[in-house]
């Protein structure tokens, strides 16, 4: 077998492998999309061939007319927006302090933030539940926002600090000579330069709460306080087998997120890449 034939065989093998990988990755997504438009409710009644069971919009009609889908969407949107704003403000201010100031226990505090990331979030669920109860935040949307913001602070503070460390401190000194205080320097000098990482932080903290199930289930009890994850999961429990309705709801949630990630992909890549650069 000559070199040309070997290259052709190798190319065919690579193409077949890539096609198999593509099929494995895309088939579950296509299957869920087809399930959203398939007649019936159960997953067992679906055809393994996408759209092989028929086509209907009844599941979407059921979501908007017979369920609280829009209320779930509203609750999740409120939680996501509040989490995003508070996380960006707190993490950026904390990162600026750690990046620009010297004070006692600075290294210890940074190390503590790093250590907090070692433990999975569910380790502290009992403590979170007790604290939320004593604060009167149980079954309140703002209580869930506090949980998310507290979880976002350690890692994201390190992330933003790593970016701020790459910004020359000479810019701060020049602004201080012109009479600017620390708040002015932070807002008018540092933040415009740190825009990529701030946008990345805003995107990740906004999208994080959307499909989280554990903490909303822990903190929120009433039906009118449910989020999208809890509401959609209720269709596929032991007592219900409405997989097609679940697929329809998941598709409605996924569509805006696909456009959102396509639009913000450049900002996310720039922000994450720049944060990895050290001075």
Image (cartoon, rainbow, N blue to C red):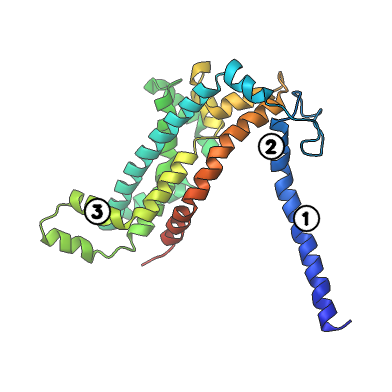
Q: Are marks 3 and 2 in contact (CB under 8 Å)?
A: no
How far separated are the C-alphas under marks 3 and 2? 54 Å
Q: Position of residue 242 (x, y in %)?
A: 71, 23
Q: Residue at x 40, y 39 (%)?
A: 84
Residue that label 2 marks: 33
Compared to 224, does 92 lie above or below? below
Of the image marks 1 and 3, the number of the one nearer the N terminus: 1
**Callout 2 secondary element:** helix
Q: Quadrant of residue 246?
A: top right
Q: Residue at x 54, y 25 (%)?
A: 217
Residue that label 3 marks: 103
**Left or right of 12 on screen, residue 58:** left
Query: How packed is label 1: few (under 14 Cα within 10 Å), some, or many (20 or more)?
Result: few
> Which image quarter is the C terminus in?
bottom left
Q: Are marks 1 and 3 in contact (CB under 8 Å)?
A: no
Which residue extends farthest bottom?
A: 2
Q: Residue at x 81, y 74 (%)?
A: 8
Q: Residue at x 15, y 52 (%)?
A: 181
**Left or right of 24 on screen, residue 233:** left
Q: Position of residue 59 (x, y in %)?
A: 67, 24
Of the image marks 3 and 2, the number of the one nearer the N terminus: 2
Residue nearer the viewer, 154 or 83: 83
The image shows a total of numbered marks equal to 3
How far separated are the C-alphas under marks 1 and 2? 20 Å
The answer to whether residue 105 is seen in the rendering is: no
Residue that label 1 marks: 20
> Which image quarter is the N terminus in?
bottom right
**Left or right of 224 on screen, residue 29:** right
Q: Position of residue 81 (x, y in %)?
A: 40, 35
């Amino acid at each position: 077998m000559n070199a040309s034939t070997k290259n052709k065989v190798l190319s065919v093998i690579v193409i077949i492998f890539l096609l198999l990988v593509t099929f494995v990755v895309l088939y579950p997504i296509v299957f869920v999309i087809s399930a959203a438009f398939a007649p019936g409710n159960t997953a067992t009644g679906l055809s393994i061939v996408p759209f092989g069971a028929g086509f209907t919009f009844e599941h979407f009609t059921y979501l908007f007319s017979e369920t609280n889908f829009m209320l779930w969407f509203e609750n999740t949107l409120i939680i996501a927006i509040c989490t995003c704003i508070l996380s960006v403000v707190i993490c950026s201010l904390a990162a600026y302090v750690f990046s620009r100031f010297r004070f006692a226990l600075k290294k210890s505090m940074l190390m503590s933030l790093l250590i907090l990331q070692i433990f999975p979030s569910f380790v502290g669920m009992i403590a979170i539940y007790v604290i939320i109860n004593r604060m009167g935040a149980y079954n309140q949307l703002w209580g869930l926002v506090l949980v998310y913001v507290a979880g976002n602070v350690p890692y994201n503070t390190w992330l933003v600090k790593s970016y701020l460390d790459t910004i020359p401190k000479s810019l701060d000194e020049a602004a201080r000579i012109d009479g600017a205080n620390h708040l002015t320097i932070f807002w008018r000098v540092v933040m415009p330069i740190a825009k990529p990482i701030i946008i990345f932080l805003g995107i990740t903290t906004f999208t994080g709460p959307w499909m989280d199930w554990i903490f909303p289930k822990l903190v929120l009890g009433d039906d009118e306080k449910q989020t999208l994850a809890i509401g959609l999961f209720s269709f596929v429990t032991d007592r219900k087998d409405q997989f097609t309705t679940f697929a329809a709801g998941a598709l409605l949630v996924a569509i805006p997120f696909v456009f959102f990630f396509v639009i913000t992909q450049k900002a996310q890549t720039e922000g994450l890449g720049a944060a990895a650069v050290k001075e």
